């Protein structure tokens, strides 16, 4: 608890986004949106606040225990969203007849989980997340499509096969295994949770829990070691990934189960290979969730995945090529197109008119707010990355247009001629976007 005179600090697990951090976040958003555009997805959004029951009934105990939940002024039990899939399922169930199938939707927004923050591992209580889903298509090709998109998003950020791996599994294969082992129907969820936590818990704890459910650690490990050879669906998945030249980025790992209760089939997670970070992305099939949420009124297969900003930002910072691309993108976004040098204060109004015309033409323009030495103005133009300067002096309406990169200049008469000349000099006045 802070004393009355102490400064108020950012809450644990929450972040301030100063311009540099905001630039990184916007870079991720740009790459995510561009990747979805290439795959033909459409953007949507849902509310940040939902009824707590939406998560209590659909997401599983692990997520429910991490909710930022409270009673609002209308005496409703509500929670800040910890994930988006239940919201998506609710929205689709309400209006699925209004959209052609399959629905290819994505969203980018903030999420909240009350868990212990681990900044170096990328675990925060508030985080931004990219979500991508295909609804209304049962063909197995959907799984490969989503995995291919996830891989392309990683590649677009400057990451390579040496930097990450997609670990693929099949949750239904585990359900079938559990039933064959004699695990009671009511114990299936507990069994899946046990497998999901095997890497994080002590061996003796896992063995004891599995024995109580009716199977053994030895049987589970034997099944895991069998890999794709015993799961035909995974074999077919890798055949398609191979056709798309994406199989080299993937490996079968039956230890991947996904902690959320609604997954039903193929699941996958993306991990970095060098830095021991937590999962970068994860998702899979959830064919029964929309049916459950709509009380049987809508029954559509679905699959999707999510990718968070916190771990991805850490990985970019640790990967030289990815960091280079981010830095280039950030410099391009921050740079202006034109700096208006006011060499004579008597022509400030004329300069302001010229600035406005340049901005109306879609250019990014700055100028000095008060009197400033001409040399200092040119230094400012250079520091802001402006390739062109326009100089308003006593000789106005003649305006000097300077190409600061080529160290060339020309004199033009009037504002219209100035704008035209600047546009010709700036062959690519808006160089934001993807970095090659």
Image (tube, rainbow, N blue to C red):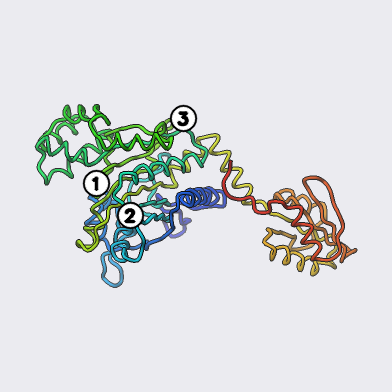
Between 364 and 276, the one lying in front of the other is: 364
Which numbered disc covers residue 135?
2
Q: Position of residue 353 (x, y in %)?
A: 76, 68
State which tag comes first along the sequence, 2 or 3.
2
Q: Position of residue 199 (x, y in %)?
A: 28, 33
Between 4 and 394, the one lying in front of the other is: 394
Question: Marks 1 and 3: CB-CB under 8 Å?
Answer: no
Residue in view at x 11 percent, y 35 percent: 181
Q: Pointer 3: residues within 10 angstroms few (<14), some, or many (20+)?
A: few
Residue farthest along the bottom direction in this orientation = 74
- Mark 3, residue position: 162
Residue in view at x 46 percent, y 40 percent: 154
State which tag comes first along the sequence, 1 or 2.
2
- Between marks 1 and 3 in the image, the one whose residue lies nearer the viewer: 1
Check the image and report above or below for 308 versus 84.
Answer: above
* Rendering quarter of residue 74: bottom left
- Mark 1, residue position: 264
Which numbered disc covers residue 220?
none
Check the image and report above or below for 137 versus 274.
Answer: below
Q: The C terminus appears in which quarter of the rendering? A: top right
Q: The N terminus appears in which quarter of the rendering? A: bottom left
Disc 2 and disc 3: Cα gap in Å? 32 Å
- Secondary structure under tag 1 reads loop
- Secondary structure under tag 3 reads loop
Q: Pointer 1: residues within 10 angstroms few (<14), some, or many (20+)?
A: many
Residue farthest along the right direction in this orientation = 395
């Amino acid at each position: 608890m802070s004393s009355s005179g102490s400064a108020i600090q950012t809450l644990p697990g929450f972040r301030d986004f100063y311009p540099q951090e905001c630039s990184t976040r916007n870079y991720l958003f740009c790459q995510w949106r561009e990747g979805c555009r290439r795959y033909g997805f459409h953007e949507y959004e849902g509310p940040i606040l939902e009824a707590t029951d939406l998560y209590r009934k659909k997401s599983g105990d692990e997520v429910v225990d991490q909710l930022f939940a409270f009673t609002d002024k209308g005496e409703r039990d509500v929670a800040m969203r910890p994930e988006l899939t239940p919201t998506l399922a609710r929205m689709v169930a309400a209006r699925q007849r209004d959209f052609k199938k399959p629905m290819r939707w994505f969203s980018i927004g903030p999420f909240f989980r009350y868990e212990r923050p681990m900044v170096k591992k990328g675990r925060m209580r508030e985080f931004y997340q990219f979500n991508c889903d295909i609804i209304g298509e049962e063909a197995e090709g959907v799984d490969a499509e989503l995995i291919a998109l996830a891989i392309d998003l990683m590649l677009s950020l400057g990451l390579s096969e040496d930097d990450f791996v997609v670990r693929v599994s099949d949750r239904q294969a585990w359900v079938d295994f559990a039933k064959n082992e004699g695990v009671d129907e009511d114990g299936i969820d507990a069994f899946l949770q046990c497998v999901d936590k095997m890497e994080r818990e002590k061996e003796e704890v896992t063995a004891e829990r599995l024995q109580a459910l009716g199977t053994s650690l030895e049987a589970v490990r034997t099944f895991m070691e069998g890999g794709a050879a015993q799961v035909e669906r995974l074999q077919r998945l890798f055949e398609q990934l191979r056709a798309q030249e994406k199989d080299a980025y993937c490996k079968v790992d039956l230890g991947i189960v996904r902690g959320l209760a609604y997954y039903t089939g193929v699941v996958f997670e993306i991990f970095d290979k060098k830095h021991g970070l937590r999962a970068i992305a994860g998702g899979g099939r959830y064919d029964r969730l929309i049916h459950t949420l709509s009380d049987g009124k809508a029954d559509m297969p679905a699959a999707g995945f999510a990718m968070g900003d916190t771990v991805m930002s850490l990985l970019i910072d640790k990967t030289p090529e990815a960091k280079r691309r981010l830095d280039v993108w950030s410099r391009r976004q921050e740079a202006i197109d034109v700096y208006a040098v006011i060499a004579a204060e008597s022509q400030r109004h004329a300069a302001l008119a010229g600035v406005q015309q340049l901005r109306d033409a879609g250019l990014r323009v700055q100028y000095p707010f008060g009197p400033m030495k001409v040399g200092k103005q040119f230094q400012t133009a250079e520091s802001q990355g402006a390739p062109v300067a326009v100089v308003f002096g006593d000789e106005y309406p003649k305006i000097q247009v300077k190409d600061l990169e080529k160290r060339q200049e020309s004199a033009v008469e009037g504002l219209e001629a100035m704008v035209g000349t600047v546009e010709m000099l700036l062959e690519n006045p808006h160089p934001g976007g993807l970095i090659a």
